Image (cartoon, helix red, strand yellow):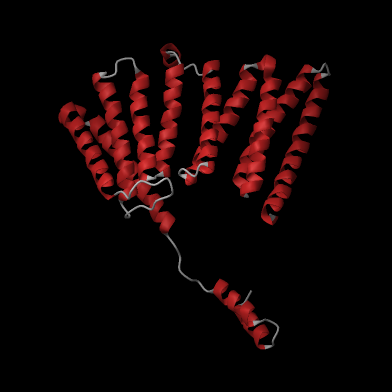
Amino acid sequence: MNKHFFTQWHAEGLLSDASIQKINEKKSPGLLSVYWEIKTLMYLAVILLSSGLGILVYKNLDSIGHTAILTFLILLCVGCFYYCIKHAPPFSTRKTASPNAVFDYLLLLGCLSFITTIAYIQYQYNFFGNRFGIASFIPMTILFLSAYYFDNIGILSLAITNLAAWLGITVTPLEILKANDFNDNTITLTALLLSALLIAAAFFSKQKDIKQHFEFTYSNFGMHIFFIACIAAMFNFSNIYLIWFLVLLGVAYYFYTKSLAEKSFYILLVTTLYTYFAISYVVVDLLTSIELSGLFSVYMGLIYLIGSAVGMILFLINTNKKIKVK
């Protein structure tokens, strides 16, 4: 609406001074923050630099030489960590701010260089032999220590990803990895264990006030891994899939109450979508198991899909209103 009308209504006494001041503040262009845009570009630059160096090394492996490559990676890694240790603020269990603008990016570059160095040593020299678990355990430990000491959520995400890889490699026989067979039940159960571990870590981070701002990262990883693993368990353990379904409903209720308590539509949306998928699996299974004519089952399935989709949307809209009101 034209600003002139508000000014006129204010002059006529229809708007108070406080109201016209708020409208003027809203209408004025003000300063535009590009903080997150620049931060994203800087992170992207570090990742592209790391990837570019990897491609450069790969394409010129014969001319550069393994020793030169390894020396460069080690020096890059040591240099980044030396800078970070020298400029890092004292350790605290609370949130600490970065000392300057380049600190986080050098830390990310140092961690990526360290992972690349370990991978290079293993690939080129087979340093750890067939003990792939050790090759992934060492970077995981360094990443967790770096995440807590330097207080960096991005490094924590890398550490959790590495933890998942380490658990997967540790519990999975080498033959399964070579055959690309990831349908093994052990992987599903390990993923469930990992999700429980991450959700517990999120809970204790918040309760014990130890890096409380890490809680969402742990919870987010745990939530996705749990729902995916639980749905996979419903498929893999088809004879007892109702038990897994009840487990999924119980955890879904936990995240539903969490979304209301934290006013998080994101958690509500993710929980709803995964739960809807699990419920649909049960309904479709029941429809196919009941002895009905083929066409009738199709009609029932279509009615369910249309009705449940509408119901889910209404549920999300109403619950979102409830979140906003609280």
The residue at the point 78 percent across, 32 percent down is: 304
The residue at the point 69 percent across, 86 percent down is: 13
Residue at far front of view: 208
Residue 290, given in percent of the width and then of the height, sits at 81, 18
Q: Is residue 152 visible?
A: yes
Task: Report the side of 179 relative to 86 (left or right).
Answer: right
Against 144, residue 10 (above or below) is: below
Task: Report the side of 17 relative to 59 (left or right).
Answer: right
Task: Report the side of 276 relative to 3 (left or right).
Answer: right
Quarter holding residue 174: top left
Quarter holding residue 122: top left
Against 269, residue 32 (above or below) is: below
Residue 36, given in percent of the width and then of the height, sits at 43, 55
Front-most of 83 and 318? 83
Q: Is residue 184 visible?
A: no
Q: Look at the image and tell me in which quarter the C terminus lies.
A: bottom right
Against 236, residue 221 (above or below) is: below
Task: Report the side of 35 relative to 288 (left or right).
Answer: left
Q: Look at the image and tell me in which quarter the N terminus lies.
A: bottom right
Front-most of 249 and 13? 249
Residue 136, given in percent of the width and then of the height, sits at 36, 25
The residue at the point 75 percent across, 36 percent down is: 308
Residue 30, given in percent of the width and then of the height, sits at 48, 71
The residue at the point 57 percent across, 35 percent down is: 223
